[in-house]
Each structure stands twice: as structure tokens, then as C-alpha cells.
Image: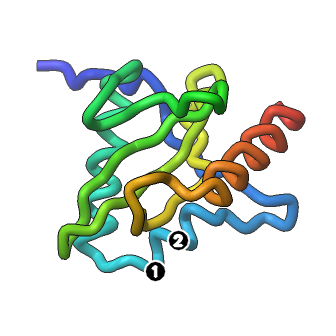
Amino acid sequence: MTMPEKVVVAKFYRLAGGREPVREWLAGLSREDRRLIGRDIMRVEFGWPCGPPLCAPLTNYSGLHEVRGNLTGKRIARVFFTVSRRDMVLLHGFIKKTQATPRKELMLAQRRMKEHDRHV
């Protein structure tokens, strides 16, 4: 039996200085939360394009998508990403604390997406 291939491959967005903000954010989470988010990202890698409840495009932010994850303690995580060729570029991750996604989180992801697009 052959293993299915990834449709897109998750890559961390890298700042000019070399830091990878999503990797750093993940490192600050518990082992179980990292496992849960990693599983959701992997499901997108193998199932792209996919839709709710796992993944959704962000309306009004062309090219941005979110992985919707449930964490321990009934918390909710979001990882914003863009797809560039066969790369799923992980731009920003955060714990969602309100019903609406905070504009500052969306703007940060959009800024990183534009920066990434300039260097591709």
C-alpha cells in the first residue's frame, strides 16, 4: 500500500532576520496543543483544497486562509496561511479569545503574506 502524497507542504514564514514566528508561537504551547495543531496542519497538507470546519478562506483578505483548531481547555487556535505553488506558508498563529477574529491578527497575516509574495 502506498502512502498518499502531500498536496501542499507546510513551511514556516521567515522574517528578514531569520526568525520564524509561527514556529516560536508553537514552541510556547503545550505538547498536546502542538500535537493538535500539527495534526490539523497535516490534514490540510494532504487534503488541500479543503473547507470548513477545518479550513476556510478569509473573506476580504484575498489569498489568506485559516486552519481552525481546537485545543485543550476548550480553547480555539487559528493559523493563517497562504498557498504559494505547492507551499502552505504558515504566516501567523494565535489563540482566539473572542467570537470575531481581531483585525490586528488579520492585518499581521496579510502584511506577512505580502512580504512573502515580494520574495517569491
On the picture, is 98 further left or further right than 101? Answer: left
Residue 119 image offset from top left, x and y in percent: 87, 37
Residue 33 or residue 95, whichever sits in front: 95
- Mark 1–mark 2 Cα distance, whole angstroms, equals 5 Å
Residue 25 image offset from top left, x and y in percent: 52, 71
What's under tag 2, amino acid-wise? Trp
Q: Which numbered disc covers residue 74?
A: none
Q: Which residue is drawn at 19% across and 19% down?
A: 2
What's under tag 1, amino acid-wise? Gly
Residue 83 image offset from top left, x and y in percent: 59, 28
Give the secondary structure at mark 1.
Answer: loop
Relative to 1, does residue 16 appear above or below in the rendering?
A: below
Residue 29 or residue 11, whichever sits in front: 29
Residue denoted by label 2:
25
Q: Are marks 1 and 2 in contact (CB under 8 Å)?
A: yes
Residue 78 image offset from top left, x and y in percent: 43, 53
On the picture, is 72 further left or further right than 112? Answer: left
On the picture, is 4 further left or further right than 64? Answer: left
Look at the image and tell me in which quarter the N terminus lies.
top left
Q: Residue at x 78, y 40 (%)?
A: 116
Q: Pointer 2: residues within 10 angstroms few (<14), some, or many (20+)?
A: some
Look at the image and tell me in which quarter the C terminus lies.
top right
Q: Pointer 1: residues within 10 angstroms few (<14), some, or many (20+)?
A: few
Relative to 20, does residue 103 appear above or below in the rendering?
A: above
The image quarter containing residue 22 is: bottom right
Q: Residue at x 79, y 59 (%)?
A: 15
Residue 104 or residue 51, whichever sits in front: 104
Residue denoted by label 1:
28
In the image, farthest residue toward the left: 1
The image quarter containing residue 117 is: top right
